[in-house]
Image: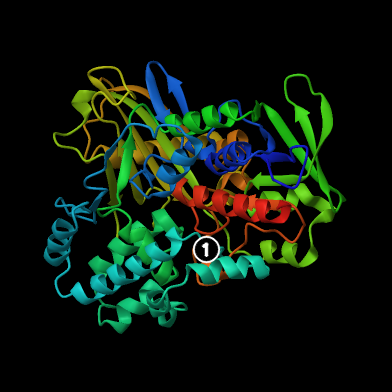
């Protein structure tokens, strides 16, 4: 319990994604009275799962960073006193197939093996990769000291300064540089294969290509898949991660309420906020008051929830954001005969150099492993996703026809690598931005945050400390962006900021 209060202070958490659950569990562990509300019926947000005909499908996220000793999930699980989920390394983290090529670019976990792969695939690029490795080293040490980025008051600034070391300052010359600019500076601007590989990988992590992605963000995103860090494949499903955090939330007295929609955030006075809640089964509506509100939503959703209470400058900034991406996802339950021998767990395909990264011209594919709990014996799951424009799906007059065309294109593309026939496909369904908007409540069904451009990453991004006192924002709209590790960092930041007010 915060030490200067005789009664536990109350916190309402909006959203039971990984960021909201993590914030709620940490606050409950640290003595707060916590209630978490979410409109869905299964916790986890975009890292939840669903089951069909014996198959378990990860909804969105399919891999995890930060489970290694010292990683953010490992640290948080240690504080909560719960065991990390069983997981294996993704090695390679991804196998990337460029147009017309059958030999993939394999992103190996072993740094020396990955270096040899780079030298084979991209001769003459070693200086570029060494600079990225140096920046990753500086960034990783800095982030592990829990800086508050971006700072919004003196306390935040002090936490930021305490995390700085002399080598942190070596990143300063690159603060306003993109990956594309570094390619040109190092004489690699005309290397199409290298640029295309970076575009594909960065689109997964930063939502934008190499010409737009902030270099300091990219250095971390591209380096985290190598040892001693790495990307992990969870045993069971992604649901295991959120279930463990839910267990911790309840262990420390927190309450989880699924099937509850949030309609509005009220500003009652300087000591509290109100949240309008609707129970979906009964349509009962009430206002939950709390000392703090933690919103695990997109920044676009936060402005909508605040309504007339949204600060004008904050609202204008959100309205001026570049459009975010949605996702088209196809979920396949297949016979094991559909999977090629020695298939990597994650693959990325680009089919045409001149086409967009998305709209079925590129696919990111995750494949289950035998015995990992996602499919019955002798069977497997294939999840393939492609970035897409959410407005395309919102404005179309033939939604089902558009969806059918995307499914057909995706199956045809996948069949170039997998063995997909009516006999090997045992279950098939697809999700669009409309689907994600319905089940997650995210504005327009957007995925992956707001894009890690120079204008929106790190020190120039949206803060966990909002302009409204005692209202906190966590999730992929804040530093350090998307992924379960990223949103967990944002949760830890908000929890530390919140507690500093109450001490």
How would you rate the neighbour count of disc 1 (Cα within 10 Å): few for under 14, some for 14-19, many for 20 or more?
A: many
Q: Residue drawn at (36%, 42%), measured in percent from left and top?
A: 63
Residue nearest the viewer, comparing 98 with 379: 379
> Label 1 belongs to which residue?
147
Identify the coloring: rainbow
Q: Position of residue 123 (x, y in %)?
A: 14, 71
Q: Residue drawn at (44%, 80%), measured in percent from left and top?
A: 172
Q: Position of residue 12 (x, y in %)?
A: 71, 39
Q: Position of residue 233 (x, y in %)?
A: 32, 37
Q: Residue drawn at (17%, 68%), measured in percent from left and top?
A: 122
Q: Is residue 495 visible?
A: yes
Q: Which quadrant holds residue 317?
A: bottom right
Q: Residue drawn at (41%, 74%), measured in percent from left and top?
A: 168
Q: Position of residue 220 (x, y in %)?
A: 37, 62
Q: Which quadrant holds residue 333?
A: top left
State the residue lying farthest toward the right.
269
Residue nearest the viewer, comparing 28 with 227: 28
**Residue 410 shown left or right of residue 470 in the figure:** left
* 412 in relation to 225, above or below: above
Q: How many marks?
A: 1
**Residue 385 shown left or right of residue 90 in the figure:** right
Residue nearest the viewer, comparing 132 with 192: 132
* Label 1 secondary element: loop
Q: Is residue 125 visible?
A: no
**Residue 482 shown left or right of residue 21 in the figure:** left
* 363 in relation to 218, above or below: above
Q: Quadrant of the N terminus?
A: top right
* 401 in relation to 202, above or below: above
* 203 in relation to 293, above or below: below
């Amino acid at each position: 319990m915060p030490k200067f209060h005789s009664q536990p202070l109350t916190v309402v958490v909006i959203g039971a994604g990984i960021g909201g659950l993590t914030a709620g569990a940490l606050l409950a562990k640290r003595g707060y009275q916590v209630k978490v509300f979410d409109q869905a019926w299964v916790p986890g947000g975009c890292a939840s799962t669903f089951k069909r005909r014996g198959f378990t499908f990860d909804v969105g996220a399919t891999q995890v960073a930060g489970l290694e000793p010292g990683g953010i999930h490992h640290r948080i699980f240690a504080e909560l006193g719960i065991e990390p989920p069983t997981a294996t390394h993704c090695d390679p983290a991804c196998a990337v197939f460029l147009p017309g090529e059958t030999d993939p670019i394999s992103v190996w976990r072993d740094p020396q093996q990955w270096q040899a792969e780079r030298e084979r695939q991209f001769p003459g690029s070693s200086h570029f990769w060494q600079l990225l490795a140096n920046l990753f080293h500086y960034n990783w040490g800095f982030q592990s000291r829990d800086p508050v980025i971006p700072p919004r008051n003196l306390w935040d600034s002090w936490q930021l300064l305490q995390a700085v070391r002399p080598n942190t300052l070596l990143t300063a010359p690159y603060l306003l540089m993109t990956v594309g600019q570094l390619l040109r500076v190092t004489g690699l601007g005309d290397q199409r294969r290298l640029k295309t590989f970076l575009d594909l990988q960065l689109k997964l992590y930063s939502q934008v290509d190499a010409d737009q992605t902030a270099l300091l963000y990219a250095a971390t995103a591209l380096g985290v898949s190598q040892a001693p860090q790495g990307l992990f494949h969870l045993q069971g499903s992604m649901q295991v991660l959120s279930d463990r955090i839910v267990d911790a939330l309840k262990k420390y007295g927190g309450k989880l309420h699924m099937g509850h929609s949030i309609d509005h955030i009220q500003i009652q006075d300087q000591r509290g906020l109100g949240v309008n809640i609707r129970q979906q089964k009964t349509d009962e509506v009430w206002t939950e008051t709390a000392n703090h509100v933690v919103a695990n939503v997109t920044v676009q959703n936060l402005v909508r929830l605040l309504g007339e209470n949204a600060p004008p400058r904050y609202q204008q900034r959100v309205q001026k954001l570049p459009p975010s991406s949605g996702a088209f996802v196809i979920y396949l339950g297949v016979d094991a005969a559909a999977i090629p021998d020695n298939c990597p767990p994650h693959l990325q395909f680009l089919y045409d150099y001149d086409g967009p990264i998305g709209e079925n011209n590129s696919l990111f594919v995750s494949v289950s492993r035998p015995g990992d709990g996602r499919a019955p014996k002798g069977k497997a799951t294939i999840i393939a996703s492609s970035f897409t424009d959410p407005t395309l799906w919102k404005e179309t007059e033939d939604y089902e026809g558009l969806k059918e065309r995307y499914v057909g294109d995706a199956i045809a593309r996948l069949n170039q690598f997998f063995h997909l026939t009516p006999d090997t496909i045992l279950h098939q369904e697809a999700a669009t931005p409309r689907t994600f908007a319905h089940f997650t409540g995210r504005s327009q069904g957007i995925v992956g945050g707001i894009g890690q451009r120079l204008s929106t990453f790190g020190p120039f991004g949206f803060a966990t400390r909002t302009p409204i006192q005692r209202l906190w924002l966590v999730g992929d709209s804040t530093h350090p962006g998307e992924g379960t590790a990223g949103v967990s960092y944002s949760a830890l930041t908000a929890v530390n900021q919140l507690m500093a007010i109450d001490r």
